[in-house]
């Protein structure tokens, strides 16, 4: 294997492919078809006739390193004003594309931001009760119809009023122009920032959705845009050393060759959480029509080596330690290493994902299967769908399973988990662990990902619910039918009402888990749900999983 390098003034990308691959042919065809310049010109025909309508209103992200400049001063002025009033803590209420980018940007900048992207009542309560006196809340939603974000906003409004604080002094709204949220926010007297409506959520890192919360938290958003601008000219060139075409060709050609999983790992990187952002971008953009690329975010190069030993996995590493990354053996022969600053990295991944969609014959801008889980959750809340019946209870754990796969005699958690893992396709399968828990308090559960990968001998993903529903949730239902699904849910220490709604936060998060499980089952995916009533139950689950 040899490394092909693509360089520009902002950094480098190196890729390697197995002998005899179609990578070179794919890259040459993209250059001949002038894909890079046509994308820069916002040509919606690049992804086929069926995608034209959607693509025509989703391509403004290509120029955000320039068009978002006007936001920088406005955000800076507001940040100074808020800090002068003693408001030093920024809480972001948002899901998916509205939260993942700011989390990465702020972590890279070393500034504090609290991301509230959960509907678990204990999480919402703890976040609201912490430092309410010096908190400013950024509510981010393109439409304002995202139920999680709307519920969080309502809870914060109530908390401010109960504390004698005018919510208009503390709430900043980011939304699309003309959305119901814009109207209600202006009526309430909130400060409103409007994002570019012709950018989809997962491509919105450099719009107001990424910049407003990050800038208010203290990140250098002007520098972030400078970084993106530094790579933009290279991304617009019809050239075989265009880093966007190089990475996009790698992802797309590997997928056509049956390598449909993407292990993501840092190698001396400075961007905690970048893998989670890439995960949403790639999974939600490509996972549809029975095809897709499944990102597998791992926490170390050692874990990357475990995942990359499977012949259906491409390894992408990022950071300054290219030697350590190169030392990881990749069974498939498909790999990439990126060493670029964060803003450049984000724009590069966006280009590459759109390019991969073209290579794969997929519209990278729609998400047809995300709404199905939302609809199922609404049916549960409305009482239109029956509540599931447990299969059995084993001590502090209640076990639920979709129909048709769990042996009738199963009576223990350990046996149920073993039965689920036995359903894994040994050549192409993956296990998705979905934890509808507190991702800070229950962080230790995520450690089971590495152990389950060793136990199963297959790629394993770990997602915190409900945030993954706005990320890999599209792939789970729209991608290849090779996954098996393990949900973990819990009872809260205490429930919390959603002001002005007929449901509580616990009822909502339960409906999200059950609803998504029902949709997965409807697509023929095996689903096992382990519900715990206490920390002791979670200990049982963690021990059982490895």
Image (cartoon, rainbow, N blue to C red):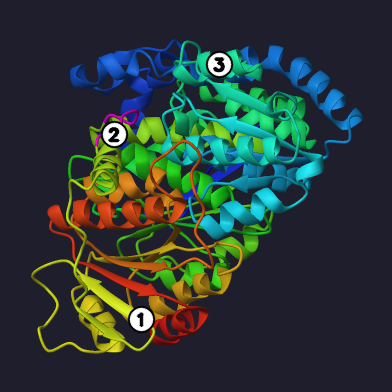
| Left or right: residue 428 compared with residue 339 | left
Question: Where on the picture, by quarter, is residue 46?
Answer: top left
Q: Residues within 10 Å of mark 3 (few under 14, many from 20)?
A: some
Question: Where on the picture, by quarter, is residue 57?
Answer: top left
SS of the residue at dot 2?
helix
Residue on which disc 3 sits: 63
Residue drawn at point x = 43 percent, y = 56 percent? 506
SS of the residue at dot 3?
helix
Position of residue 444 relative to residue 70, above or below, is below
Residue on which disc 1 sits: 397
Question: Where on the picture, by quarter, is residue 321?
Answer: bottom right
The answer to whether residue 270 shows anywhere in this view is no
Dominant secondary structure of the magenta stretch?
Answer: loop
Task: Tell me the CA gap for discs 3 and 1.
Answer: 51 Å
| Left or right: residue 104 compared with residue 431 | right
Q: Is residue 367 magenta?
A: yes
SS of the residue at dot 1?
strand
The answer to whether residue 289 shows anywhere in this view is yes
| Range of magenta residues | 363-368
- Residue 346 image position (x, y, % from top left): 57, 36
Sequence-wise, the earlier of marks 1 and 2 is 2
Residue drawn at point x = 36 percent, y = 57 percent? 510
Sequence-wise, the earlier of marks 3 and 1 is 3
- Residue 119 image position (x, y, % from top left): 48, 50
Is 419 or 455 nearer to us in this picture?
419
Task: Tell me the CA gap for discs 1 and 2.
Answer: 45 Å
- Residue 221 image position (x, y, % from top left): 73, 29
Q: Is residue 17 magenta?
A: no
- Residue 213 image position (x, y, % from top left): 68, 33
């Amino acid at each position: 294997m040899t490394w092909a390098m693509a360089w520009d003034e902002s950094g480098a990308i190196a890729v390697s492919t197995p002998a005899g691959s179609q990578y070179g042919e794919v890259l040459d065809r993209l250059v001949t078809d002038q894909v890079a310049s046509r994308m820069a010109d916002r040509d919606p025909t690049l992804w086929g006739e069926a995608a034209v309508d959607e693509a025509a209103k989703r391509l403004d992200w290509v120029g955000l390193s320039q068009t978002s400049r006007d936001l920088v001063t406005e955000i800076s002025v507001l940040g100074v004003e808020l800090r002068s009033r003693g408001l030093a803590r920024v809480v972001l209420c948002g899901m998916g594309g509205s939260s993942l980018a700011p989390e990465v940007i702020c972590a890279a900048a070393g500034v504090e931001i609290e991301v509230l992207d959960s509907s678990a009542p204990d999480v919402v309560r703890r976040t609201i009760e912490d430092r309410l006196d010096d908190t400013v809340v950024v509510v981010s939603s393109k439409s304002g119809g995202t139920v999680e974000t709307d519920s969080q906003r309502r809870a914060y409004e109530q908390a401010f009023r109960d504390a004698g604080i005018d919510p208009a002094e503390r709430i900043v709204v980011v939304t699309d122009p003309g959305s119901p949220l814009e109207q209600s926010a202006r009526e309430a007297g909130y400060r409103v920032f409007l994002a570019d409506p012709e950018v989809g959520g997962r491509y919105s890192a450099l719009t107001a959705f990424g910049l407003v919360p990050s800038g208010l938290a203290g990140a250098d958003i002007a520098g972030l845009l400078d970084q993106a601008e530094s790579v933009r000219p290279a991304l617009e060139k019809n050239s075989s050393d265009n880093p966007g075409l190089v990475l996009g060709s790698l992802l797309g050609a590997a997928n056509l060759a049956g390598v449909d999983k993407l292990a993501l790992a840092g190698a001396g990187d400075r961007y905690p959480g970048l893998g989670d952002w890439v995960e949403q971008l790639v999974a939600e953009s490509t996972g549809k029509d029975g095809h897709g690329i499944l990102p597998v975010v791992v926490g170390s190069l050692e874990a990357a080596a475990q995942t990359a030993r499977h012949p259906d996995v491409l390894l992408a590493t990022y950071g300054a330690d290219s030697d350590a990354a190169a030392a990881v053996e990749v069974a498939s022969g498909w790999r990439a290493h990126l060493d670029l600053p964060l803003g450049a990295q984000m724009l590069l991944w966006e280009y590459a994902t759109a390019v991969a969609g073209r290579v794969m014959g997929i519209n990278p801008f729609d998400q047809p299967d995300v709404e199905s889980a939302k609809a199922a959750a609404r049916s549960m809340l409305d009482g239109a769908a029956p509540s599931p019946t447990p299969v059995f209870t084993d001590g502090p754990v209640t076990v639920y399973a979709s129909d048709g796969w769990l042996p009738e005699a199963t009576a223990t958690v350990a046996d149920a988990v073993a039965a689920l893992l036995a359903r894994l396709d040994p050549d192409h399968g993956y296990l998705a662990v979905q934890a509808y828990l507190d991702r800070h308090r229950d962080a230790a559960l995520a450690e089971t990902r590495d152990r389950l990968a060793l136990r199963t001998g297959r790629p394993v993903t770990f997602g915190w619910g409900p945030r993954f529903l706005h990320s890999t949730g599209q792939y789970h239902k729209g991608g290849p039918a090779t996954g098996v699904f393990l949900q973990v849910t819990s009872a809260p220490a205490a429930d919390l009402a959603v002001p002005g709604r007929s449901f509580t936060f616990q009822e909502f998060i339960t409906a999200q888990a059950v609803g998504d499980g029902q949709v997965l089952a409807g697509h023929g995916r095996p689903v096992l749900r382990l519900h715990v009533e206490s920390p002791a139950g979670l200990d049982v689950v963690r021990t059982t999983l490895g």
